[in-house]
Image: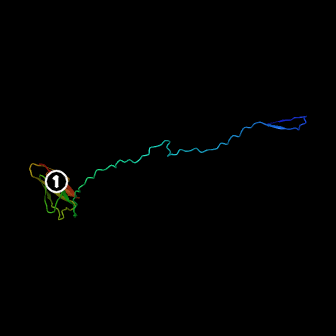
Amino acid sequence: MSSVETRVATSEPVVERVKETPTRPPRPTPTIVPTKKPDPTHTPYPTHTPYPTSAPAPTSAPAPILTPVPTPARPAVSGYLLKINGTYVRPGHVSILIENGHIMVHPMTGEDGSYPNRTEVTLGYYPNNAAAGVSWSGVDLLKGDISVVYMDRDREVVATIGP
């Protein structure tokens, strides 16, 4: 606001003086400043940087040399094969020699060493020592000292005759 002074009855011209009251300085308009998002890769302190070393590379032991063991291939036959203690029953043979005795096979195989499907093969044991017993695995039926195998697939029988 201003006030006005007036002078009267002087030879001087009338001068008006305006006295202004100080006004407040204008406030600055707030400026929106975006906030800085933290940098995910920023590290506030220095980190260790690995340096290559002159250590020798580890050496591995030499690989062992493996000697291949031949696996007997299944012969190409028309029927099923019978293996007793790891040996195929051969054509024309009725006796298989095993440790402490032998095994008798009935009937004999066909000309190719195989048995037709559903053949009933009877196995009997004959020990070197008359008092020895036998244990069988891989058979279908036990009839006293005799075992039976039904040839519906290739079969493997293990016979162990005691001393």
Q: Nearer the viewer, residue 146 or 39?
A: 39
Looking at this view, is 40 or 57 the one in front?
57
Front residue of 21/83: it is 21
Residue 30 horizontal side relative to residue 48, left or right: right
Residue 16 vertical placement versus 69 (above, below): above
Q: Position of residue 132 (x, y in %)?
A: 11, 49
Whether 90 is drawn above or below 54: the answer is: below
Give the camera-side residue of 123 and 17.
Answer: 17
The disc labelled 1 sits on which kind of residue? Ser
Q: Which residue is mark 1?
A: 147
- Residue drawn 83% across and 37% down? 17
Q: Quadrant of residue 117?
A: bottom left
Q: Is residue 15 left or right of residue 154?
A: right
Left or right, 88 with respect to 63, comes to: left
Quadrant for the N terminus in the image: top right
Provide residue 161's location: percent of width, then percent of height.
13, 50
Image coordinates for residue 23, horizontal then vertical, percent: 74, 37
